[in-house]
Image: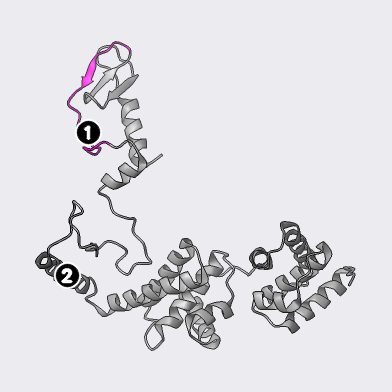
Amino acid sequence: MSDDKIQEEKEKSQVACPECGSTEIISDSTRGERICTNCGAVIDEHIIDEGPEWRAFTSEERNKRSRVGSPTSFAVHDKGLATQIGWEDRDVYGKKLSPRRRAQIYRLRKWQIRTRVHSSMDRNLAYAMSELDRLSSQIGIPRTVKETAAVIYRKAIERHLIRGRSIEAMIAAAVYAAARIRRVPRTLDEIAKNSRISKKELGRCYRLIVRELQIRIPLANPNDYIIRFSAELRLSGHTAQRAIEIIDQAKENGLTAGKDPTGLAAASIYIAGIIEGERRTQREIAETATVTEVTVRNRYKELVRRLGIEITV
């Protein structure tokens, strides 16, 4: 329940009927009156209706008639508070505009776009947020991760961390940090590949953001990668569950400390695939996990040996 509703309920509970003293008061929005249910006395009248003047009977009709805008978003350079002139070239009745009116709207639209970006910080944010949109769609991250990345990048601008550095690299680093914070598995290689910068530069910018903004990054969990890799390899839920059980056993035996979580996830999937009869080659798993076949093979041998897993070839 919202704060306004709670306050309204409190006010209703505090109102007592002046005739009988009852607190059983109801509000009639149609008549604009407040009535006592015990004796029928009208306590208040001509109450202002704060709702819309229009009526709607379906959700589609309600959304069409609503005058409120979209919620604010940190992933837009002006947080979505500015107005926009659409590109439909039609009036409110759906009729096409005349050539003279269309040229006028075009000039208004051009100047409206120019006035939205009037400072160097706005220009930086406009380019950065467009790059964030592109990268987010490329690697398929959810909206929550995108919003978190936008907040991290805005904090980096406030701390003057962007000067002398590539906007693409800082956005990619913010996305990687946001994915780690939200526990959405995305590897450093994957983000570097889709952001058109080197992995070394991405790692450097990521460490800078974490250090200067004092962000607490949770430890990567191999189980998060197992679910994603299993879906991409089209493995069943039983195989994915068996791989998670193998990782849990490795954690209990202290085998995951200091190891790359993607390599451990890939090796556990390889072992679980053999056990469940859904074998995938080491090359397939390595390409999906963006690791080398040597890494998969080494982690596989270590897990089998240390956990005592019997593999039938």
Q: Amino acid at mark 1?
A: Asp
Q: Residue at x 35, y 37 (%)?
A: 5
Q: Residue at x 24, y 25 (%)?
A: 30
Relative depth, front residue between 102 and 260: 102
Q: Residue at x 17, y 70 (%)?
A: 106
Picture coordinates of residue 219, whole percent (x, y): 62, 69
Determine whether label 2 and label 1 are within 8 Å by CB. Answer: no
Picture coordinates of residue 270, whole percent (x, y): 77, 71
Picture coordinates of residue 29, whole percent (x, y): 26, 27
Q: Amino acid at mark 2?
A: Tyr
Residue 221, picture quadrant:
bottom right
Furthest residue to the left? 100
Relative depth, front residue between 21 and 151: 151
The quadrant in which the C terminus is found is: bottom right
Q: Residue at x 82, y 76 (%)?
A: 302
First to last magenta residue range: 38-55
Q: Which residue is mark 1?
A: 49
Q: Residues within 10 Å of mark 2 (few under 14, many from 20)?
A: some
Q: Secondary structure at mark 1?
A: loop
Q: Residues within 10 Å of mark 1 (few under 14, many from 20)?
A: few
Relative depth, front residue between 274 and 91: 91
Residue 46 magenta-highlighted: yes
Q: Number of marks in the image?
A: 2
| Residue 259 in sight in this render | no
Q: State the predominant SS element of the stretch in magenta.
A: loop
Above or below 301: residue 148: above
Of callouts 2 and 1, the N-terminal one: 1
Q: Which residue is mark 2?
A: 106
